[in-house]
Amino acid sequence: MIGFDETPERLMCSRAGCRERATSRIEWRNPKIHTADRVKVWLACDEHVDFLREFLAARDFPLRVVAADAADETDQAAQTADETERQA
């Protein structure tokens, strides 16, 4: 278990039982229970990205797949937008 002050050494695939390094980030939400601004994230290795994407797509959940390292850029952009709104 990861504590609040700890960071994992590497990103691992979210597929049950898989411990491979994640190469993709699957951002999704269930529109029946999540508002448009709420996004859940699953990480996927090369072997499981299609399986996880298809699992979510079969349920008609809005999703997008990006490179796992794109998370830093997305998080930084969101943080910058939040800071800009607070300053306005």
Image (cartoon, rainbow, N blue to C red):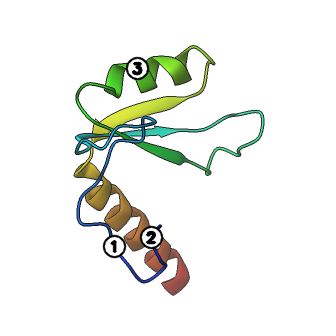
- Indicate which disc, 3 or 2, sits on the residue closer to the N terminus: 2
Which residue is at a point 49% across and 73% down the rendered structure image? 82
Label 3 environment density (alpha carbons within 10 Å; few <14, some 14–19, many ≥20): few
Q: Secondary structure at mark 1?
A: loop
Numbered badge on residue 7: 1
Which residue is at a point 30% across and 38% down the rendered structure image? 66
Q: Secondary structure at mark 2?
A: loop
Asked if the residue at tag 1 contacts the one at tag 2, i.e. Cβ–Cβ closer than 8 Å, the answer is: yes
- Indicate which disc, 3 or 1, sits on the residue closer to the N terminus: 1
Tag 1: residue type? Thr
Which residue is at a point 41% across and 71% down the rendered structure image? 79
Q: Where does residue 75 sit, x and y in percent of width and height? A: 37, 62
Q: Where does residue 38 sit, x and y in percent of width and height? A: 62, 51
Is residue 11 depicted above or below 23 in this figure? below
**Between 41 and 35, the one nearer to me in the picture:** 41
Is residue 49 depicted above or below 44 in this figure? above
Which residue is at a point 60% across and 26% down the rendered structure image? 61
Quarter of the image holding residue 23?
top left
CA distance for labels 3 and 1: 26 Å
- Furthest-front residue in view? 17
Q: Secondary structure at mark 3?
A: helix
Tag 2: residue type? Ile
Figure label count: 3
**Between 77 and 39, the one nearer to me in the picture:** 39
CA distance for labels 2 and 1: 7 Å
Q: Which residue is mark 3?
A: 51
Numbered badge on residue 2: 2
